[in-house]
Image: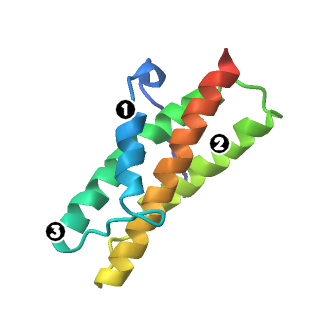
Amino acid sequence: MTQRTAHPPTGVDRLPLDLETMRATARRLLGGEAQLPTGEGLDTHVLALRGHLELLVPVVEAATLRLPKDHVPRACALACVGEARMRLRLGDGATESVRLAVAVKLARSVNALADHTENLNRARR
């Protein structure tokens, strides 16, 4: 079975990402002040997190291509991309507690990829 990786369209790494909104979405599920949504609110939140990851993954991946293969931040970012892709394949879960656990994992990936986006942009300068 052959695996294919979608390559981002030209210019995707220059899309204006609203990292602050993405982080705010993730913060609703993380940290001591987390506001845990339930029911349809949780479903909506998971959709938003998945959408954020769909935008972040190709941007981070494209940013790593310009760095040397032995660059440590590049390796870390690519590992995070792999983790995010794995989490995107997770189902939503049959129970509220499983759905919440999936949402928290997605939120952690959003935060990590937002960090990598900023770090890789600084490394390019």
In the picture of the structure, the residue carrying the numbered disc 1 is 18
Q: How many marks?
A: 3
Most extreme residue toward the top, as rendered? Answer: 125
Tell me the SS state at disc 2. helix
Q: Position of residue 22 (x, y in %)?
A: 38, 43
Residue 123 visible? The answer is: yes
Q: Position of residue 21 (x, y in %)?
A: 34, 40
Q: Which residue is mark 3?
A: 40
- The type of residue carrying mark 3 is Glu
> Crowdedness of circle 1 by 10 Å Cα count: few (<14), some, many (20+)?
few
**Contact? badges 2 and 3 (CB < 8 Å):** no
| Residue with the mark numbered 2 | 77
Judged left or right of residue 16, residue 6 is right
Give the spatial CA distance, label 1 vs label 2: 19 Å
| Mark 1 residue type | Asp
Vertical comparison of 24 with 15: above or below: below
Q: Amino acid at mark 2?
A: Ala
Numbered disc 1: secondary structure: loop
Q: Nearer the viewer, mark 2 or mark 3?
A: 3
Question: Residue 88 sits in which quadrant?
Answer: bottom left
Q: Is residue 90 at all visible to an observer of this figure?
A: no
- At 66% across and 50% down in the image, what residue appears? 79
Dot 1 or dot 2: first in sequence order is 1
Is 42 or 58 nearer to us in this picture?
42
Above/below status of 88 relative to 11: below
Residue 106: horizontal and vertical position, in percent? 44, 59
Residue at 34% across / 51% down in the picture? 25
- Pick the quarter of the image with the C terminus: top right
Q: Is residue 72 left or right of residue 84?
A: right
Instruction: Tell me what residue is drawn at x 37 percent, y 47 percent.
Output: 24
Q: Estimate the spatial distance between the alpha carbons at disc 2 and disc 3, rounded to whole Å.
A: 32 Å
Q: In terms of secondary structure, where does tag 3 sit?
A: helix
